[in-house]
Image (tube, helix red, strand yellow):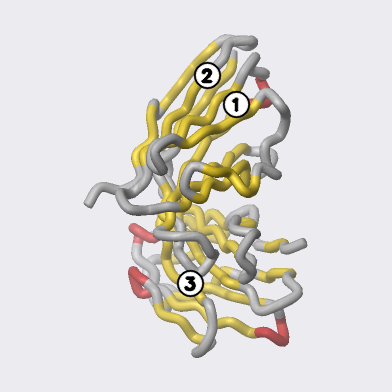
Amino acid sequence: GAGVSQSPSNKVTEKGKDVELRCDPISGHTALYWYRQSLGQGLEFLIYFQGNSAPDKSGLPSDRFSAERTGGSVSTLTIQRTQQEDSAVYLCASSFSRGNNQPQHFGDGTRLSIL
Amino acid sequence: AQSVTQPDIHITVSEGASLELRCNYSYGATPYLFWYVQSPGQGLQLLLKYFSGDTLVQGIKGFEAEFKRSQSSFNLRKPSVHWSDAAEYFCAVGNSNFGNEKLTFGTGTRLTIIP
């Protein structure tokens, strides 16, 4: 079966623009996670979905960041009014169900560059 | 709060030599522990995981790791490395309680293999 799919793979945009990043999890996986990987901060948790609800948004760095998940499948991470510090690789992961005893499977990420 | 320390930023080993990557964690209860590998431009691939039971766990690609509660460590080992093992390695800890489904990652160890 297909793995976690993320699009676009690369995104370059100007400061102040809005961007949308998409994640298509492994079919049947109910849990979905977004992480950010940047040079200065390493891998940081952003948000977790179980089904369509987001029990944990604690990692979102500011109110410019939001995410949604519809139909218990595809998720979109939106960054409004992008800043240069938003430049990073955004990784999505999914797992079969909730609980950290369910291994997370990662996509290849979206590399976001803010000019 | 849970945390992970990978004290070695960069390690260089000769092909065919043995390898040990260090990982120390901080967590109040029995943690869920993971090692992931990331090749350039790719997402994270799960090498192995520890949830409970036997403290020596076997993973893919000939890797193993040993959980030592007394030392709060989960070091990754391989008896003989191959050039294809060159990559970045991340140790991660997960909360064993429902309601806190996220992984906390170490800063990674970059592995270089020399002929």
Q: Are marks 1 and 3 in contact (CB under 8 Å)?
A: no
Residue tagged by mark 2?
A19
Residue at numbered disc 3: B49
The structure residue drawn at horizontal position 38% and vertical position 53%, both measured from the top left corner, is A29
Nearer to the camera, A97 or A112? A97
Callout 2 environment at 10 Å: few (<14), some (14 to 19), or many (20+)? some
* Residue at the image point whose x is 65% and y is 62% from the top: B6
Q: Nearer the viewer, mark 2 or mark 1?
A: 2
Q: Are marks 3 and 2 on the same chain?
A: no
- Chain to which the residue tagged by mark 1 belongs: A
> How far apart, in angstroms, are the residues tagged by discs 1 and 3?
30 Å
Q: CA distance from mark 2 to mark 1?
A: 11 Å
On-image quarter of the C terminus of chain B: bottom left
Residue type indicated by callout 2: Val
Q: Residues within 10 Å of mark 1 (few under 14, many from 20)?
A: many
Foreground label between 1 and 3: 3
Amino acid at dot 1: Ser
A48 vs B29: above or below = above
Name the chain letter of the residue that bears numbered label 2.
A
Q: Which residue is mark 1?
A: A87
Instruction: Measure how far apart labels 3 and 2 are at the Cα level.
Output: 34 Å
Q: Residues within 10 Å of mark 3 (few under 14, many from 20)?
A: many
Marks 2 and 1 belong to one chain: yes
Find residue B113 and report its image quarter.
bottom left
Q: Residue at x 35, y 45 (%)?
A: A4
Q: Residue furthest bottom?
A: B54
